[in-house]
Structure formats: structure tokens, C-alpha cells
Amino acid sequence: MSAMSMPMGSAFDVAPWSQNHLTRVEQALSQWVGEGAPAGLGDAMRYAVLDGGKRLRPLLVLAAYEAVCSSASVATPALDDAAIRAACAVELIHAYSLVHDDMPCMDNDVLRRGKPTVHVQFGEAPALLAGDALQAFAFELLTPDDSLIPTAIQATLCRLLARAAGSAGMAGGQAIDLASVGVALAEDQLRQMHRLKTGALLQGSVLMGAVCGHAAATAYQALSDYGAAMGLAFQVVDDILDVVADSATLGKTAGKDAAADKPTYVSLLGLARAQAYAQELLVEAHSALARSGLPDTRALAALADMVVRRSY
Amino acid sequence: MSAMSMPMGSAFDVAPWSQNHLTRVEQALSQWVGEGAPAGLGDAMRYAVLDGGKRLRPLLVLAAYEAVCSSASVATPALDDAAIRAACAVELIHAYSLVHDDMPCMDNDVLRRGKPTVHVQFGEAPALLAGDALQAFAFELLTPDDSLIPTAIQATLCRLLARAAGSAGMAGGQAIDLASVGVALAEDQLRQMHRLKTGALLQGSVLMGAVCGHAAATAYQALSDYGAAMGLAFQVVDDILDVVADSATLGKTAGKDAAADKPTYVSLLGLARAQAYAQELLVEAHSALARSGLPDTRALAALADMVVRRSY
């Protein structure tokens, strides 16, 4: 995963880049998740995390890390280690949030990534505990014993992740979402909900990658803007897919937002304007990359494209 | 909360010490918890944390910090800040675990600290989210922006807390507890369950305080032994109180372990031997303090006494 593994100046093909980095992420998750946990808990944690998911957040961490390293060639084994740990940590937070979201008291969903949800497979109490343990494990991954990762980076990664996951981030957005069922939100309220609910962790992933590569202030700010636009685009597209895709393609229950009478970009703007808005946000994301001053942001650009053009 | 505020060599009265430090903890929690959270979520978080609880874990953090500072006079405003943040962070983890434990899919308890449990008061989904947000906020507290707290201390505090809370700590112990209903555990299995379920966070509290004061290796190991013995004593006494106390005194439902057919020290050893074991562990805790080499461990000694002699 060294920054040097990405040839600069050549045509960029995102497929092999993604495949290469996904392999690293899957190996790391498979090695780490559930290690040292009591058997039943470890099984539920691994079920929740492994063998499924697009791994968008880990790829954002690694793409941002490499983009920053492309500027100053600062990649070292310790920073590579920080980046892969950060990549896994954001996925653990995402996975735990899905486990808890799917529970009967929340969305009561039985299908996720094409498999029975964790509480269906293991029971509600084990699902609750597995989610809790995954959140704690994310922070454990960021702060390894006897590591060469600079402590300033470890602390900053914990700060960014905690904020992205907590009451001013993902959990806060979910709380607003819960409270908004059947309520007519204005566009700025809907945007604020999504900024927190999904945007904060997507943007946080980009920032965590940037921190692993010691990003300078200008690049950091540009990557933050990229993360905000891309994160919001993700949710707009999610709202669109909930309407236009079927459950088999999504790997989860389609049409559930409308069924639950939840406000979405489609219900607010209509389908055509929601699609146009996703395109605008994509342009914004690309333009932020252009002003980052980083010489190679092709992987980040390709990931934003994937976010908007995905079909599931 | 400076280490200097505790006169050395004079007779030690734990009541004013506790009162003084509890006031600091309550003020800090009240200032921080729920700040920046959407209204409904913030309310549930504050309800879960404020106005209740013995605050044993925060007091252990502060007592360990001051004990270490009594040796080397290293207390600084930045380290004082680290210690009060660590004190609040362990309480947030404890509070979140109670919120989730009380939920219908776990212990299904309606009374906690003499009040309706969070899910009774706010609903199940908000309780689930409030617990999740409290865990994230614990790590946020440990990694403040623009702080003078050395990053090595911030990172170590996150590591200790994550381990104490996660699958090899509290959440792991709860998973074993869940799986052990109606199962005859041997004493070493019961001890292992309790070491994780309650012991890990109690011991972690002591270690986090020690880290805030830059404890030397000998003192750190002795405090770790103190934390292990005191943490196990806490659970033995909990098992005893579940049998001998009533719900009004406990502020929670008494007799629920026996009702749930859960293995306890009382069911395993009988009441008299369980009481004797708690006393043995108290002696072990005191003896660990004696070999710490720290000049003033009176607050830690008094807290261990309180743990064993408490009636609720």
C-alpha cells in the first residue's frame, strides 16, 4: 500500500487500484476483527464486518493518504500502518452502525448485503453487544501498543473518528432521522441530517487518510471540501437508488424510505432534480481536488465518480 | 483537582475528598455531555449520565492520578485536564453500558439509579443511539482540539479505554454473561467473566489515572494489581448485595441474578465464603498499594474499602 505503488503520470484505471487496496483491507479486517473476543461475540463481529460491503470508506482513507503522499513522498511503513488501521477503523464504525440500525427497535431490517442481518442470525442481545464491541475496537485499532505511528497521528485519528461517529456526526444524524419520520423537512434540514448521518463518516474517512500522510493545511481543507461534497452526493444517490433499484440489486430492502414515510431528496426535489443535484455535487468534489495542490488525486476522483454512478 | 490540594501526612478523611472530587466530576459531565448533540439525543445522553451514580470509576481515575503525582509532583494544568477528561470518559462508558444492558433485548430492566431506565423514558431506538453516542463521546473527550495534553497520553488513554470497553473487556464479559445463563460455571470461569465484565473498566480507570500522572513502571504494575483485586471485589460484593439488599436501597431491581438463573459468587461459594473472598481481595488491594512505592495512596485505599463495605 505504499504511495509509490501507484505510477504517476500514466493513465489511471480505478478497477485494479480498488482491487489491490480492497485485498489489503479484507486481509487486515480478517486478521484483526474478533481477535481475542469470546467465541460467540467474535463470530457476530466477524459476520457483521467480513465478506460484504463496498468498503467505500476504507478506500477513501487509502486514496486520501496516497494523494497526500504523492505530494511529499512522506510514506513510511509506520504511516502505511496508520492508514490501513484507519481504513479498517472507519469500516468498523460503519459496520457497527448497520448492525444497530437493522435492529427491530430501529429499522427492523432482515436483509443486509444479501445476508440475514446480525440480529436475525445471532439474536438481538448478541447483535447489540457486537455493535458496541466493534465501536470500541475501532479505537483500539487506532492506538496499537509499541507502534512507530506518531502519537500525534494516533490521537488525531481518534479525535476525527469519535467526532464523525458521535452525537455531532453519525449518531446525531440518526437521531434526527428517527425524529423526522412523517415530518416535512426543508432542504437545509434534510441536508444537515445527511451531512451528519452519512456525510460525517465519509468526510472523516478522507480526513483520516490525509492526517496519516501529514497533509498541509491547504490540501487538508480542499480534501475536507471534497469529502463534504462527495459525502452528500452519496446520500442523494442513496435516496435515488431507494426509489429506482430493486432489493436484489441493492442487497437490502428497497423502497423502505418511502414505506417509512421518511423525507428524502427524491421526495423533496423529485427524481430528476435529485439526479441533477448529485451531478452538481460531483463537480464540486472534483473542483475541490483541483484546488488541493496535490499532484495525484486520481483515485479520489474515481471514487467520487463511483459514488455518483453506482447502481447499488 | 491539583495533586497539591491533598495535604500529605495528615489524617485522611475520604468523605470530603470524595465530595470535592465528585463536585468536579459532576460539573465537568454537566458541561460536556450532550453539548452539540441534536436536542432529543442530547437529552437522552444527559439523562443517562447526570444526576445519579456513585461515580466510582471517575474517583478511581482521580485517586490514581493524585497518588502518582504525590510521588513526583508532576501535576500540571494539562495533566489535571487529562485526568478530569479520563474521569468523565470512564463514566460515559459505564453509563452507556447501563443504557444498553437495561434494554428489553438484554436485561429488560425498568429501574436504574431509582429512575425509569433510558429506554422507558425515551424509547428503545433513542436509548440505543444515546448509548452509541456516549461511547463515541468518551473518545472525543480524551482527544481535545488544541490541547496541551501530550499526544502520547491522549493515545494511551484511548488505547486503555478501548481495551477496557471492548471485546477483550466489558463487552466481552457481557457476551460471556449472556451465554452463561443457566450454565454451571466453574470458579475460574466466573472470575474470568467478571474480570472482563466489570473488572476491566475498574482496573482501566486506575490505569488511566496512573498514565495521566506519568506513573513509573513499578507504580504502574502495583496499581494494575490493585485495580484487578478491587475490580473483582466489586463484583463479588455486587453478587452479595443482589441477594441481601432490597431494590429500594440498590436503586435497581434486586434478586435479578437468581431470578435469571445467572451464576454468581453467592450461588457458587455460598454467602459466607463469598463475603470472606471479598475481604481477601480487599487485603490484596491494600497490599498492592503498599508495594507501589507511592507516598500517598490513601484515597485509593479508602475507595477499595468503600467498594467492599458499601450497602448499594
Image: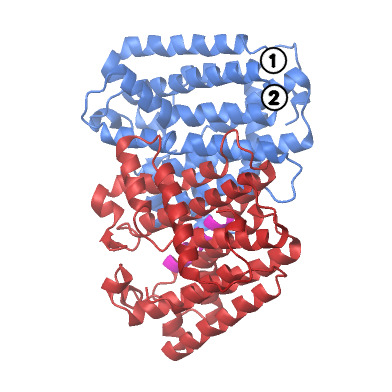
Chain colours: A blue, B red
Position of the N terminus of chain A, as image quadrant, is top right
Contact between marks 1 and 2 (CB within 8 A): the answer is yes
Q: What residue lies at 60% left-to-right and 64% top-to-bottom?
A: B7
Indicate the secondary structure of the residue bearing disc 1: loop
Q: In this view, does B154 lie to the left or right of B241?
A: right
User: Residue A30, image x and y in percent?
Assistant: 62, 47
| Residue nearer the viewer, B188 or B2 | B2
What residue do we see at 22% from left, 23% from top? A184
Q: Where residue A210 appears, x then y in whole percent? A: 64, 26
Judge whether residue A168 is colored magenta: no
Does any portion of residue A179 appear in the rendered image? Answer: yes
Which residues are the magenta region?
A: B163-178
Residue that badge 1 annotates: A296
Q: Mark 2 lies on which chain?
A: A
What is the crowding at mark 2: few (fewer than 14 residues within 10 Å), some, or many (at least 20)? many
Q: Name the residue under label 2.
A: A66
Is B303 situated left or right of B225 in this image?
left
Image height of A185 relative to B228, above or below = above
Left or right side of B261 for A142: right
Q: Is the magenta stretch mostly helix, strand or loop?
A: helix
Whether residue A102 is situated above or below residue B298 in the rendered picture:
above
